Image (spheres, rainbow, N blue to C red):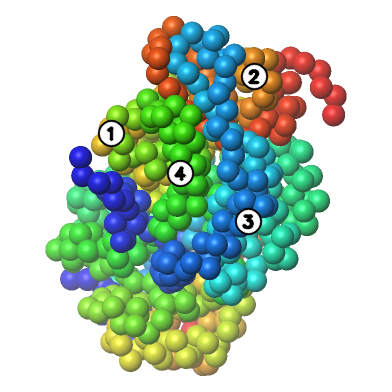
Amino acid sequence: MNNLDSLPKKKILSLFMTCGFPSLSHSKKIFNEMLSHQPDIIEFGLPFSDPMADGPIIQEANKIALGSKLSTQQSLDLIKYLSKSKNNTSFVIMCYLNTVRKFGLNKFINNIKSIVDGIIIVDLPFEEESAIKKSLSKNNIHLIKLISPMTDKKRSQKLLKGSKGFIYYISATGITGSNKLDYKEINKNVKSIKKMSSVPVLVGFGIKSKKDVIDISKKTNADGVIIGSALIQKYFDLKMDLNKYLKNLKKFIQEVKV
Amino acid sequence: MKKYKQPSTVGRFGEFGGMYVSETLMPLLLNLDKSYKKIQKDKKFKKELNDLFKNYVGRPSSLHFAKNLSKYINGPKIYFKRDELNHTGAHKINNCLGQILLAKKMGKTRIIAETGAGQHGVATATVCALFGLPCYIYMGSKDIERQKPNVFRMKLLGATIIPVESGSKSLKDAMNEALRDWIKNVRDTFYIIGSTAGPHPYPKMVRDFQSVIGKEAREQILKLEKKLPDYLIACVGGGSNAMGLFYPFLNDKKVKIIGVEAAGRGAKTQETAATMTSGTPGILHGSYSYVLQDNDGQIKEAHSISAGLDYPGVGPEHSYLKDIKRVKYFGITDKEALEAFQTCSKLEGIIPALEPSHALAYLIKAFKNKHKNKVVILNLCGRGDKDLFTAAKAIGFDADE
C-alpha cells in the first residue's frame, strides 16, 4: 500500500515542514496539528547544513533544528511516531543526498519503509539516480521527480519515464519561497508535463496564500500545490510563539484546504 | 602507467566529482558543459585567451631560483613558479579570463562569483571591468572583515559586494549564496567559480584554464635544469593553483607531487581546513569529494588563518589523486604558515600570500637537510599584500589601518 497511489485527482494539498524545527518537542506538536487536518501529503524536510536549493527561510529553519543537535535518526523516529495517525495522508521526505549517503542507504530505507510513501532528494539528478531508485522501488517508496522551467522537452521525457507518486513542478525559476508566480508559464509547462506522464503534477516554490492556491487551481492545469516556506515564515512572523502559531496554522490550513 | 585521462564524460574523477544539483541547475550545467566542449576546439578562442594571458596578465610568469631559501634549507634546489606576479596578484586571473570569454560566447550578460580571500573576487571584478559586464561578488562577512584591501579593490573595479551572513560567514557560505543567485537568475547569469570545486564541468574547466601554470613550468624547468623536477609542491584549498601546476606533470611518474592543506590549529582539532587529512567523502556544492563533516553528514565549519584555504571541501580531482596515491597531501598549521611567511619575505624579498606560505612551510619542514641534488618547483600562487593586516595581528605587530 502506498498512499501516493490513491491521491485525489484534483486540488491536492501538500504541506512542507522542516523536521525538528524549532525543537523536537515543538516540531511534534506542529506536525500533529498539520496531520489533524488530513492534508493529502505532508513533506518532512530533513535538516541539512548546506541546503543550497532552499531559500533563506527554510535555511534558517534547518539551522535552528540543527542548532538543537537534531540527528537524522531523531528526524526519522519523529516521522515514525507521527505515522501512527497517518491515515490517508501520504508521507514524503525531502532531503539532500549527503544525509542519505552518510546514514547509509539501506539503513535509511529500513527506517522509513511502510511509513514513508515517497522521497524527494533535491540534489540527486536523474543522471545519478538509478541505484537509489532501484532500492527505493523494491521497498515501495516512490522517488519523486522535480521538473523546472529550465528542463526542456527532451529532458522532461527522459525524467518522467515511469514516474510515480506525483511530479513536483518548480513554479518559478528560483529557490523555495521566492519570486513571483507566472501563471502563464506554469500552465504551459504543466500542460506539457501532463502530456508525458499520467501522475499528478503539483506546483511548488512561491505559494504563499489562499489566493495563490485558488489561482493555481483556476488559471493552470496543475493538480495541486505544495506550501512550505510560507508555513515557516508564519512562525517567525509570530515571534516564535508556539501557541499562537498552532492556532494560526490551523486557520491557514483550513483556508487553503479548498 | 596508463595515460592520465580524467574526468569521464559525466565529470567523474574515479568515483569523485559528478553533478549533484537540483533540477533548476542541471539543464544549465549540461548546457555549460556543451558550450565548454565547443570552445575547446575553437582556435579563435584559444588565440584570444593567449593574447590576454600575454598582454593583460603578463604571462608567462617567471620561474625563479630561490637561492637563499635553498641555501637556508640545505636541501634541494628550489624554484618558485611566480604566479603572484600576475596582474591582480595571484593565479586566479587565469581562470577568470577563460570563463568570461566563455560567458561572452554564451551570450550571458551578468556575472556572479564567490570569494574567500578576495583574490578570486578581485580577478572576477577585473575581467568584468575589462569586458564591461556587471559583476556581483558573494563574500562571507567574516572574510570581508579580514580582507579589507581586496574588498576596496573590488569596489574600485566596479563590482557589487554582497555580504553573506549565513553559516560560518566564509567561503562555503558565499558559494551557497552564489549558487542560489544562479538558480534565481539562470537565464542571463554566468557563475564564475574560482576553484576546481563545484559540480561538473567546473572542476575540469578550472583545471584546464589553470594548467597554463604547469605547462609553462614544464618548459621553463626543462630549459633551466635540462630535466623534469623531482618534486612539485602547492597549497590546496579548493585546489585550483595546485591542479594548474600538477596537471601537466601527472603522466611523469618520476615527478613526486605534494599538496599542502591548511590544518588551522591542527589537523586533529576541530579548527582545521585539512579536508583530506581530517575529512571523509561526501557531497558539498554539487560534487562528491572529501569534506569535513559530522556523523550525520552535516558539513562542518573550516578554520584557517588564510581565507583562501578556509573551505571544508576540496576539488574532486584532488580526492581522486589522493586515493590513487599519485599526490600526497599534508597539513600545515596557522603557526607554521606564519613562520614561513616571514622566512620567505626575509630570505627571498618576496612577501607570499598566506596560502602558498603553507606550501613553503611544508617545504622548509620536510626538506630541511634532505633531498640534496633534487629540484623542487613550488607554486607561489599569490602575493601577501592582502594578508598584511591579518599577519601583523597574528605576529603581534601594530599595523594601524
In the rendered view, would you say A244 is above or below B70?
Answer: below
- Please name the residue shown 63% across and 56% down the image: B52
* Chain letter belonging to callout 3: B
Q: Chain of mark 1?
A: B
> Which numbered circle lies on residue B348?
2
Residue A241 versus residue B128: which sits nearer the camera?
Answer: B128
Q: Amino acid at mark 4?
A: Lys
Helix, strand or loop at label 3? It is: helix
**Residue nearest the observer in this picture, B254 or A45:** B254
Considering the numbered disc 4 on the image, is that residue within a helix, a strand or a loop?
helix
Q: Along the polypeptide, which appears first: circle 1 or circle 2?
A: 1
Q: Mark 1 highlights which residue? A: B253
Asked if residue B276 can be seen in this view, the reply is yes
Mark number, residue B215:
4
Q: Say what secondary structure mark 1 lies in.
A: loop
- N-term mark: 3 or 2: 3
Viewer-closest of A58 and B278: B278
**CB-based contact (under 8 Å), mark 1 and mark 4:** no
Cα distance in 3D space between marks 3 and 4: 17 Å
Residue receiving disc 3: B52
**Cα gap from disc 3 to disc 2, whole angstroms:** 29 Å
Q: Could you tell me which secondary element the residue under label 2 belongs to?
A: helix
Return the chain for callout 2.
B
Q: Are marks 3 and 1 on the same chain?
A: yes
Mark with earlier residue (3, 1): 3
